[in-house]
Image: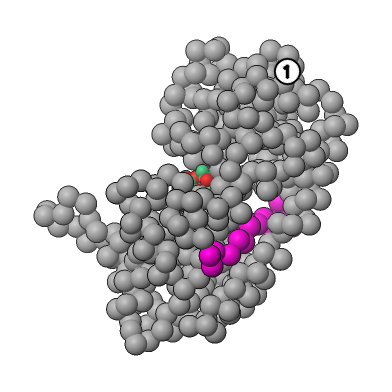
Amino acid sequence: MKIGITCYPTYGGSGIVATELGKELAEKGHEIHFISYALPLRLNRATPNIFFHEVEVTDYPLFDHPPYTLALATKMAEVAELHGLDLLHCHYAIPHSVSAFLAKSMLEPRRLPVVTTLHGTDITLVGADRSYLPITRFSIERSDGVTAVSHYLRQATCQTFGICSNVEVIHNFVNCDIYRSSPRPDMRLRFAPGDEKILIHLSNFRPVKRPCTVIEIFRRVQERLPAVLLMVGDGPERGRAEWLAHDYGLDERVRFLGKRDNIDELIGASDLLLLPSQNESFGLVALEAMACEVPVVVSKVGGLPEVVTDGREGFLVDPKDIDGMAQRSIEILSDDALRREMGRNGRQTARARFCSDEIVRRYEDYYRKIIDRS
Ligand code: GMT
């Protein structure tokens, strides 16, 4: 198949899922065309059947906001026509699915089936905002196929948009060959020279991820056992989190590493992942940790209970219960046998339900169904 993929190219789960999916599909022989305003973050290696088409947004003094949605639609239609795309797959509804609808309309009577994958905040936050709700609903309804990354998100789409049927749940995935246990003694030594326990948090540091809460949890943990914290990623809340760590006198123990590529190595070197999000439609990073045999302490919200079973791969805790999260973290970190067992369970769950082989096959089947139907 020849598939166009549009996603945000920046640091964030939806872009990562889109990019990894494109890479896996290309491995299986499909021709993949990424269409976005910048090269997606994890698309750093040249591969023969992966193409990247950059959307350039022409500015003009009259435009307060250059119209990316229109430039994207134009590029989508151009790529579809020139390369004979069989299908266009949009990750994150806003504004990608609106552009796809325009592209598809421009190409008529030629058919260009559009699949939209809903990732989370496109439904729960941005899409639910009154200024975007009607057009988000419209673009989802006009997509030929719609997938959601969790049952929770499908339910939220039903509640917020009244779209209750024809949303297929295809969970996120991880490449279980890349994300695997790799204790990395060299890296451990660098971050924890005194053999401290290593906690890790990775996110786009938006308010919904609550990075300051990570610092609060860590402050409690390090009072009870020697520990360091790796904060990976960047975003609007990073400054507040750094100041908080500073005010608590934790500069030596908390390392803000910024955006990094070698996520699997950083997770592999850690003992525990913290994800105290306000909401999370799936929580891709929790799955990545599980695949690396690293236990997780995560919020009991959204789609996370579909990924993590409380007491098995780690713990699910009420997001308001900071003491509880700290307590559960201490429990895992002070009991090596428990930590290893939870790590093994995580790997087992990842392999049984979320490895790329199986999930990518489901996307392929879904594409074929939508193409046949169109
Ligand atoms: O987090 C966001 O604001 C958007 C989005 C992203 O691009 O990272 O995250 C969502 O999509 C991920 C991939 O499907 C999910 O793993 C995240 O749980 C989800 N974020 C939220 O629901 C907050």
Residue 51's x, y, as percent? Answer: 47, 71
* Residue 167 part of the magenta-drawn span: yes
Percent across and percent down for residue 283 are 60, 45
Name, please, the residue furthest toward the bottom: 109
| Residue 113: quarter of image | bottom left
Q: Secondary structure at mark 1?
A: loop
Query: Is residue 6 visible from the viewing direction of this image?
Result: no
Residue at 45% from the left image edge and 80% from the top image edge: 85
Q: Quadrant of the N terminus?
A: bottom right
Span colored in magenta? 165-180
Front-lying residue, 45 or 284? 284
Q: Main secondary structure of the magenta part?
A: loop
Q: Give, as a three-letter code, the residue at label 1.
A: Pro
Q: Nearer the viewer, residue 70 or 11?
A: 70
Asked if residue 218 is positioned above or below residue 77 in the image, the reply reads above
Instruction: Work out whether 73 lies above or below 342.
Output: below
Which residue is the site of mark 1?
226
Q: Is residue 269 above or below residue 30?
A: above
Q: Residues within 10 Å of mark 1 (few under 14, many from 20)?
A: some
Tell me: residue 174, above or below residue 187.
below
In the rendered view, does 232 fall on the left or right side of 135? Answer: right
Q: x, y (%) of residue 244?
A: 49, 18
